[in-house]
Amino acid sequence: MRMETARRRRSLISPSTYVVVGVVVLVAALATAGVVLYQHSRLVTVPAVTGLPLDVARQSLGLADLELVVSGERLSVDVPAGSIISQDPEAGSTAVSVPGSGV
């Protein structure tokens, strides 16, 4: 009886090559995402909106490519109804303006 030994076929590409290619693709994808975010962002000075009516505050922030985000409603004896009582980040601080970023 003749026993034939099975020959193992060796792949022309080693497993470590697959790992290296995967890492390179991942780094390229992250670099591309970073470039896109960088191109669509910029540093802006946050305008003062405390005490302003909502529509005026929204326009003022829009000029800085920022968006107004209302986090709640409170009553104030010092600020008229429908106006901004406080803001975060503070006026004069620097913020990264990315489309859709809010104040």
Image: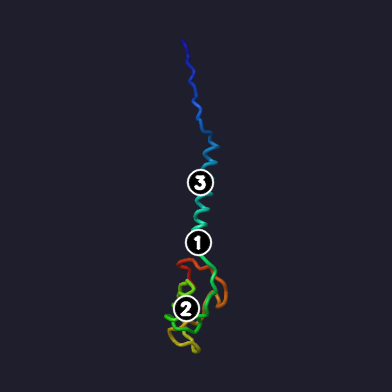
Q: Position of residue 2 (x, y in %)?
A: 47, 11
Q: CA distance from mark 2 to mark 1?
A: 23 Å
Q: Residue furthest bottom?
A: 77
Q: Which residue is mark 3?
A: 25
* Residue at x-position 50% and y-position 61%: 39
Dot 2: within a 10 Å radius of its alpha carbon, few (fewer than 14), some, or many (20 or more) residues?
Answer: some
Q: Amino acid at mark 2?
A: Ser
Q: Nearer the viewer, mark 2 or mark 1?
A: 1
| Circle 3 SS class | helix
Q: CA distance from mark 1 to mark 3?
A: 21 Å
| Circle 1 SS class | helix
Closest to the observer: 64 or 73?
64
Q: Amino acid at mark 3?
A: Val
Closest to the observer: 97 or 88?
97
Q: Which residue is mark 1?
A: 39
* Residue at x-position 51% and y-position 33%: 13
Q: Which residue is mark 2?
A: 60
Dot 1: within a 10 Å radius of its alpha carbon, few (fewer than 14), some, or many (20 or more) residues?
Answer: few
Closest to the observer: 67 or 39?
39
- Relative to 97, say whether 35 is above or below: above
Answer with mark 3 or mark 2, whichever residue precedes in sequence.
3
Q: Amino acid at mark 1?
A: Gln
- Relative to 10, say whether 92 is above or below: below
